[in-house]
Amino acid sequence: MYKPLQSKTALHKLKSNYLPYKYDLNIYRGCKHNCIYCFAQYSHKYLDSKDFFNDIYYKENIVEVLEKQLTSRNWKGEVINIGGVTDTYQPIEKKLELMPKILKLMIKYENPICICTKSDLILRDIELIKELSEKTVVNIASSIAFKEEKKRKKFEPYSPPTIKRFNMLERIKKETKAGTGILMMPIFPYITDDVESLEYIFKNAKETGIDFVLPAILNLKGDTKEKVFKFLKKEYPLLLPKYERMYKGAFVEKVYRDAFYIKIRNIKKKYNFQNKRVKYEPERQLSIFT
Ligand code: SF4
């Protein structure tokens, strides 16, 4: 089911201080990618639906309300994260074409953005991304955490294959001035954390000139824990007791976490991979690779 929504505002101010942006813009509520670990599912409880993966709402008037906010005297041109809750490039975006209109506004007002998407539908808008990246800071990332397709399909059944995501980032890197990155997450302990799988991602990132790779281990906030444990019980029953021991709360135990990041440090050293993050300096409208 697809259902239009009317929205009063387009930009949502975030409380977090550790993120490199302060505002979120979400066109869609609900997500067709169907990732079993999705922690955005909670957001549907504020709507009259319980089916996050099938009932997709879209903010029909998002372009009008966004332009109002971008032209408001209070708006300081800060970085906007597009799609912080739900992936912006839903399959229906192909038909609705809301993103090109939003990108045109960003070009008009030279507003810096970042986007994280699993979908290569973003390539439809590559010319707009190119134009915007010539005016201000643009960061495009994709979450990539699986080497094996068979495994990935179990965890993210309706999202594009890993190789398509690499190709998408590679094209954006080659054809635009946008920074590109991989959110290597969520890493599932004892399922996707073997050296070979992790190296595959860093090796490809290095070869395709990707600017940053940010790894993160699975976290199990709210009712995601119950959902993931149910999935493990079916697909990886032998691992379930281990997970129950490692996840007393929402985050993995320290011993595992410390060992994981040592492994990452060694892989980064092996591939001589260093993150270059594009930072935004508002006064100077500059992008700085750090
Ligand atoms: S792509 Fe993101 S929002 Fe969509 S189901 Fe997966 S984790 Fe959830």
Image (cartoon, rainbow, N blue to C red):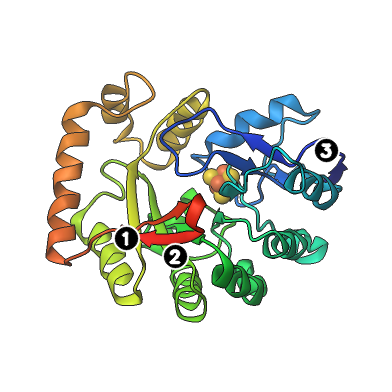
> In which quadrant of the rendered image does the C terminus lie?
bottom left
Disc 1 to disc 2, how far (Cα)? 8 Å
> Measured from the top left, where is residue 287 in percent x and y?
44, 61
- Answer with the quarter of the image where residue 52 lies: top right
Against 124, is 158 above or below?
above
What's under tag 2, amino acid-wise? Gly
Disc 1 designates what residue?
A: 276
Q: Nearer the viewer, mark 1 or mark 3?
A: 1
> Measured from the top left, where is residue 45 in percent x and y?
70, 25
The disc, 1 or 2, on the residue closer to the chain's N-terminal end is 2
What's under tag 1, amino acid-wise? Lys
Residue 9 left/right relative to 12? right
Q: Nearer the viewer, residue 22 or 87?
A: 22
Disc 1 to disc 3, how far (Cα)? 36 Å
The disc, 3 or 2, on the residue closer to the chain's N-terminal end is 3
Residue 21 left/right relative to 290? right
Disc 3 to disc 2, how far (Cα)? 30 Å
Against 248, is 278 above or below?
below
The disc, 1 or 3, on the residue closer to the chain's N-terminal end is 3
> Measured from the top left, where is residue 274 in percent x and y?
23, 60
Disc 3 designates what residue?
A: 7
Q: Residue at x 49, y 66 (%)?
A: 161
Q: Residue 179 has which mark?
A: 2
